[in-house]
Structures are given as structure tokens and as C-alpha cells.
Amino acid sequence: MSNQIIIVNNVVKKFKKFTAVDKVSFTVDKGEMFAFLGPNGAGKTTTIRMLTTLLHPTSGRLVINGFNPLKEQQEVRSSFGIVFQDFSLDNELTALENLRFHAALYSVPKKLAEERIEYLLKLVDLWDRRNDFIKTYSGGMKRRLEIARGLVHHPKILFLDEPTLGLDPQTRNNMWDYIKKLNKDEGMTVFFTTHYMHEAEKYADRIAIIDHGKLLTIGTADQLRKKTKTESLEDAFLKLTGHGIRDESGKSIDALRTAAKSWGNR
């Protein structure tokens, strides 16, 4: 039986004439902590959206926990939990109400849901605040609750799209402690993106780097450093993707300035 829980084979995603993901292939093993890195606009979020059934690939093959995201969407969605960059909790509900609503969406039996919710809220140190409205929570508390919510239906895979963005260092460290514990105790596969290179270096078993829609390399942090003859993962990342500043679309700021200057001289 295959140990691969995520298979991406020669996947392409085009938006009209723009190719956001260009013949990308990789696999992720069961129970692996896998980092998916790239500059702004590299194709990370587009890839995650395809893996989580939010987008259809233009071509190529995807397999999630043995299921086809195009033909077996419900089975795929039951296989993963996801934490997005932006908060997506209902501020007018309590922590308990948010998690119970999520459990109902995934048809988790009520008794099992209550047991699971209590376990998860205790895991992320929010049990004592379970009856408080989300609007009273700090950013770190909301992020911890979102992780708990993503696990209520007991998924095999947890997708994290920059889960610690905007959090202070203490909260970020605590967050990763929770995630690592889940990975270890439950054998959960964790697929994450981050712009904090030290997070990928410290927590990922393997790291993939994508840029301009193409997969540049994949391996352990040590392998990437050796391959690029650099001293740190950040240096390796910059050597592979360049030092130019990107906007959110992935375009170089210098290129944009040059284009603007050219336009102004017309």
C-alpha cells in the first residue's frame, strides 16, 4: 500500500493566457511535515486551492488520501482540514458554537463531536474560554481555535496557509508546538506555507520551493543548503528565487517601476 497521501503529477493551472502553475509534480508521505515555499505570486496558494477542491487544474493529476479531487470532492474534503491566511471564524459565536457548527457541516455524530471538541479545546488551551465570544479573542487565540476547528472531523491532512502571519514570536512558537504535537500524536500530515524561513527549517521534514509556477527544488533543509552552497535556508531560498522584491501578483517591483517610467515618458 502506498505511503503517499498527496500526489501531484504534472499539474498545470492556467487563467486565460497566464500560467499560474506550470507542470508541477511532487508527493507528500503520510505523517510528513511538508513546507511549500515561494515568493509572492509563485503559485503556492493556487496549488493549495487545487488540492483542496477550490480550483480545478487545467491538466495533470491530483490524488488526496487516495481520492480524486475532481470526481470525489466530498471524500477529499473529509480528508483534510485547512487554516487560511485570513481569519474565518464567526465573531458573533462562541468557541463552542463555532466548533459545533463545523462538526455539523461534516456530519460528525453529536456525542463524538462533543468529545472531540473538548479534547481539541484543551489541546489548544482554550477550554476555559469555550463560552466566550470570538470577538473577545486575541489574534493568537483565534488562530489556535481555527486549528482546532480544522481538526474536528479528524482529517488525515492539515493544510496551513501562512498560519502564523501577523502573530508575535511567542504565539508563533506556541502555535508550532501545538501543530508538532498533532503531527506526532495523531500521525497527521501537515502541509504548510510560510514566509518565515526558520519555521520551515525547524519544523519541515522536507521543503519544496516554487517560483513563477514552476517547482524549483525539493528536499530537506540540509539538502537545499548543500545544493545551493549556502549557509541557511533563507540564503538558499534567495539564491533560487532571486533578491528582487515582489508585489502580491509576483511581479518584480523594479520591473513595475521600469514599466511605469517607460509609460510616463510616452
Image (cartoon, grey):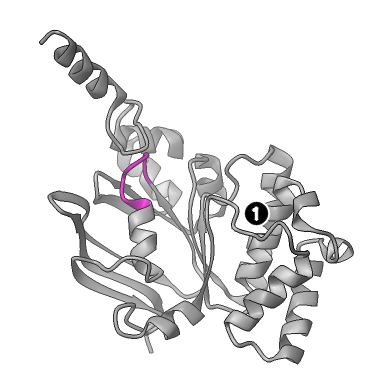
Amino acid beneath label 1 = Trp
Asked if 262 appears above or below 12 in the picture, the reply is: above
Task: Give the quarter of the image for residue 50.
Answer: bottom left
Residue 100 on the magenta span? no
- Which stretch is magenta? 38-44
Residue 39 on the magenta span? yes
Residue 230 appears in the rendering: no
Judged left or right of residue 144, residue 228 is left
Task: Give the quarter of the image for residue 95.
Answer: bottom right
Judged left or right of residue 70, residue 78 is right
**Nearer to the camera, 84 or 60:** 84
Report which residue position mark 1 lands on. Answer: 176
Judged from the image, the secondary structure of the residue bearing numbered disc 1 is helix
Task: Name the spot of residue 173 as percent of width and height, x first.
Answer: 69, 47
**Nearer to the camera, 22 or 85:** 85
> Quick one: which residue is furthest to the front in this view?
92
Judged left or right of residue 224, residue 35 is right
Task: Name the spot of residue 262 as percent of width and height, x first.
Answer: 15, 14
